[in-house]
Image (spheres, helix red, strand yellow):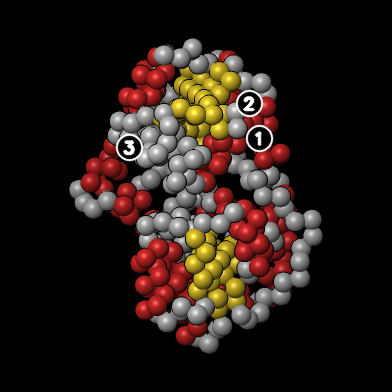
Amino acid sequence: MRFLMLNWRDPKNPLAGGAERVTEAYLRGLMERGHEVAWFANAFDGAPEEEEIDGLQVARGGGKFTSWRAARRWVRKQEKFDLIIDQHHGLPWYAPWWGRTRCVAYIHEVLGPIWDSFYPWPVSTFGRWQERWTHWAYRRTHFWTASSFTRDQLKKHGVRQISIIPYGVDTQALEHLDEKPLKEPLRLVAVSRLAPNKRVDHALQAVDSLRGQGVDTRLVIVGSGSEEGMLRALAEQLGLVECVEFTGAIDEEEKNRRLREAHFLVHTSVREGWGLNVIEANAMGTPACVYPVPGLVESTWHDRTGLVTETESARSLARALHRALEQPDDYQRHRHEALDRARGMHWDRVLPQACDQLEAWARE
């Protein structure tokens, strides 16, 4: 069978992130079963219109608001696909109206408040409105997500058919936990695109609060993005230059080493589709301390695989971490449960179910 994924970014896009890694895993799973797959994405500077990435056909065209038209033109020149996957990131591809074949919609998160992180009023208000309108317009299209919260939001917006297919991770879980007593210096790591909606500045403020209480705390920030300059300036302003490290983008081996060394992954995002790096940290025997927001409350089981703060504030984050230091036995229990959960979320375990479902939709 032939499958087409429509997604705004492809694996080589400089802004590609967790959504693209998950998307590629699904497509390669289909390829391993002998299916033909293609990926259409937005164009970006320096990228060819078409290329093959390790056997995966990638085509590009258009920008944020025009790529759906470029995709329509490209599809009309191709042999008919059995299934088109219309992946939403705030904006859709409108494939049910031009795809001429079966379509499903794939969504990680309903952006909602994330519009406010990137755009001022009235653009943010319009973004929220068009997102709700899009879901209503797609109400007869079958949606697929990994998040029960996203499923519930879609239902509120009128969508009738929604399937939950779990994410997986590439990270191979440790066979045995290392010795890692919870003691000072408290080692924290944030793994994130440095963008407004990720609120990495809250992690810096939490470190400042902990150090103000006499807790020797270190923070490693892994990732790059538009907020890096602001975050570096804030670290300097707070007097944290000696205890905060910015690594920029690093390879998987180095990222896993950083996750393994940390006592906690801290995650302060406005909203996540899931929070894959939480499970990646768990695979390295490291619990997460996260904000109580959609996605993160699903990837982190409070007081089992990590901690969920009481509120979305740096003060609450610092309080949760300080309390954890006072309960080192609980920390070791969290590590064991986190590792056990991560073992069950490797792609080897979850990909067969996803591919079975995609094949079933293509045959309908």
Q: Position of residue 271 (x, y in %)?
A: 44, 52
Instruction: Label 2: state its secondary structure.
Output: helix
Q: State how far apart marks 1 and 2 are (Cα).
A: 12 Å
Q: State how far apart marks 2 and 3 are (Cα).
A: 28 Å
- Mark sitting earlier along the chain (1/3): 3
| Badge number at residue 266 | none
Q: Is residue 320 left or right of residue 332?
A: left
Q: Residues within 10 Å of mark 2 (few under 14, many from 20)?
A: some
**Kind of residue sitting beneath label 3:** Lys
Residue at image mark 1: 351
**Kind of residue sitting beneath label 1:** Leu
- Mark sitting earlier along the chain (2/3): 2
Q: Is residue 232 left or right of residue 220?
A: left
Q: Position of residue 273 (x, y in %)?
A: 49, 46
Q: Position of residue 267 (x, y in %)?
A: 51, 61
Q: Position of residue 256 (x, y in %)?
A: 64, 58
Question: Which of the image's four quarters has the C terminus?
Answer: top right
| Badge number at residue 64 | 3
Q: Is residue 244 left or right of residue 178?
A: left
Query: Is residue 143 visible to the viewer in this orientation of the structure?
Result: no
Residue at image mark 2: 31
- Mark sitting earlier along the chain (1/2): 2
Instruction: Label 3: state its secondary structure.
Output: loop
Q: State how far apart marks 1 and 3 are (Cα).
A: 30 Å
